[in-house]
Image (cartoon, rainbow, N blue to C red):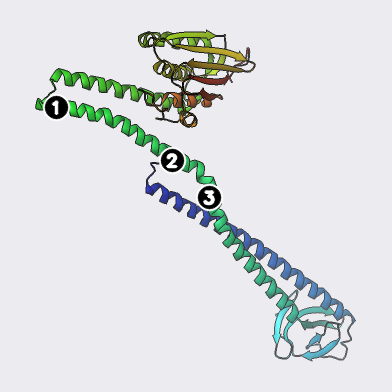
Amino acid sequence: MTSLAPQLHSRLLRRSRWGVAALGALVVLAVLATMSAGAFVTVKDRMRAHMGARLRRVAERIAVGGSDPRSLVVVDERGRVVAEVPPPHLGAGTPGVRIVTDPRFGALAVIRVPTVRGDRLVGASAQEQLRALSEILRVLVALTLTGALVAFPVGYALAGLALRPLDEALRERTEFVALASHQLRTPLSVIRTSAELARAGRGLTAGEALETILAQTHRMEELAARLSALARAETGPGGGQRQLVDLDTVVARVAADLEPAARLQGVSLVTEADRVAVPGDPSQMADMLTAVAENAVRFSPPGATVVLALRRQGSRATVEVSDRGPGIAPEDLPHVTAPFVQGRGTRGGYGLGLAIARAVAERHGGRLSVISAPGEGTTVRITLPVARSGGPPA
């Protein structure tokens, strides 16, 4: 079926995908930035703790008796004193390691260590540690930005997959509205033309115009009824009264209602029904079976027989409606349960019967399948779950 979705729909879908992708990238960026910041702070704190522990051990074993207690003792990597420099201003009682800058040694890690001679300042070069932290920071920033950049196209692709069911639903709804409008526009056009011709007195009397208008009005009423049935089917069993339904009774009532139309068509209508109860909405069950059986009668040639068979097979009830009509071409078979779709060469109808029946069956936990071949007739099979014996409706 050719898509009737306008370009606005495509643009809206693209904008939605871009929006979802951008939001996903921002979320990934925020998560990675938070994780990177946490990792950086953790590494930084551990590095400072390690330097502080090393400086405390050094302060306990170095000889500082002859040094100025107010100076900063600078040690090398092996813990040997290399110089005493004027102390930096750290503030009274400042705990932990502080990083200060000295004109001679550059960045120093300094800690205040209490000793028997009072608090002493001990420091060591922190150039390597700062370079390592800087490199870690660059790597974390690069990974965060790369993750966000990668998340954007990945998010765009995943958004396409996630939005595909919605896109298909919107396209189907747009096509449905367009086709319904087309079906209504034809009889309205005939009504208008008939009225104008009758008013102008151009080959059509008022009586003839009224007959045409009544016929087209009946056609629109029939279409409206079918559309209402489809809408009821799509609302699901929750929209109606869910109870135990004697499906054999529904089959008999549907056959009785269609008997006059079948007789007028010259078609025999035969029912074969076991006693089966299913949980569901009785009115929707009647809509489902009527839609299928009415199709079978309409497309059967005079003298043919339409069979409505109901059988219980374990925990499932199976309804089969078989006719000896023209059948359905293989290329049309996968699409005949879509609204307004009819097989090639069919006459009359709106292509809503099987769509209604499929919607009702699926909403009641069942499924509908169509078996057909050109010239060999068609069998529509509906399977439904059987009600539990003696129990409440499922």
- State how far apart marks 2 and 1 are (Cα): 40 Å
Q: Residue furthest left?
A: 201
Please identify the quadrant where the N terminus is shown.
top left
Residue corresponding to mark 1: 197
Q: Position of residue 299 (x, y in %)?
A: 40, 18
User: Which residue lies at the image location 27% right of the left edge and 30% below the top edge?
Assistant: 186
Residue 170's tag is: 2
Under mark 3, the amino acid is: Ala
First in sequence, mark 2 or 1: give its number.
2
Q: Position of residue 45 (x, y in %)?
A: 73, 69
Tags 1 and 3 in contact by the CB under 8 Å rule?
A: no
Under mark 1, the amino acid is: Leu
How many other residues sit within 10 Å of disc 3, few (<14), some (14-19) or many (≥20)?
A: many
Q: Secondary structure at mark 2?
A: helix
Residue 374's tag is: none
Q: Secondary structure at mark 3?
A: helix
Residue corresponding to mark 3: 159
